[in-house]
Amino acid sequence: MAPSLLPLLLLLFGVGFLLANARIIVDYLKFLRRRRFALLTWPDARPGYSYLSIGLAVALGLLLVYNIAALRTADPQALFGEGMMFLYYAWLLPLSRRIGRGFYQDGIWAEVGFIPYWQIGGVTWREGEEVTLIIISRLRNLARRLIVPLAHYGEARRLLRDRIVAHDIDFTGTGLNLENHDEREDV
């Protein structure tokens, strides 16, 4: 790769990681406000590739230290890109795993974000090696998943039924509107 393209490429990576970092920070701040209203939560499961992200954080940290301490003419664009990637892998990705997944008073925190109960247009369970709740949005053509630990499976089903009975989750107006259909049976 031509040396002149590397700083531009690192700048583009930096902008992308800046956006990802900002999203994690916003999600974590939302979690801090919402956590006192938790009904049933658990920490995010550590993915199998966590050692890879730790290795990337160490490598990026060493690269940053070298580029700054060696006092070579480091390009600010390259430092920005490396810094944003280091911030993501060393601090923000582990921080995002501390967000409690599960059920809150006003919605469900799925694997990739929070969905209020009023936005839920459908739910279904997938049972296999792990139990997964699939949450379908009524506003967008979007489905989110929530991996539920087996120890919390029964309580999660009860919480969903309670929210349906309280009409916090309403399936009417989504899909087929069948007469005499008990929504609690969907859970």
Image (spheres, grey):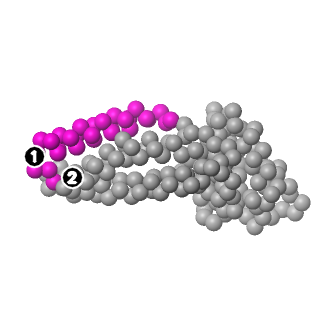
Residue 122 in percent (x, y) is at 71, 56
- Within the magenta stretch, is there residue 50? yes
Three-letter code for the amino acid on which mark 2 is drawn = Ala
Name the one closer to the observer, 38 or 175.
38
Question: Dot 1 surroundings within 10 Å: few (below 14), some, or many (20 or more)?
Answer: few
Residue at figure coordinates x 79%, y 49% from the top left: 161
Residue at figure coordinates x 66%, y 62% from the top left: 119
**Mostly what secondary structure, the magenta segment?**
helix
| Res. 177 in view | yes
- Within the magenta stretch, is there residue 9? no
Name the one closer to the observer, 153 or 90.
90
Image vertical order of residue 31 relative to residue 94, above or below: below
Residue at figure coordinates x 54%, y 37% from the top left: 45
11 with respect to 97 (left or right): left
Image vertical order of residue 178 relative to residue 147, above or below: below
Q: Which residues are magenta?
A: 46-75
Residue 146 in percent (x, y) is at 62, 45
Give yes or no for contact between labels 1 and 2 (Cβ–Cβ under 8 Å): no
Three-letter code for the amino acid on which mark 1 is drawn = Arg
Q: Which residue is mark 2?
A: 78
Image vertical order of residue 56 relative to residue 180, above or below: above
56 with respect to 140 (left or right): left
* Sequence-first disc among 1 and 2: 1
Q: Which residue is mark 1?
A: 72
Question: Dot 2 surroundings within 10 Å: few (below 14), some, or many (20 or more)?
Answer: many
Q: Which label sits on residue 150?
A: none
SS for dot 2: helix
Q: Which residue is the extreme one toward the right?
A: 180
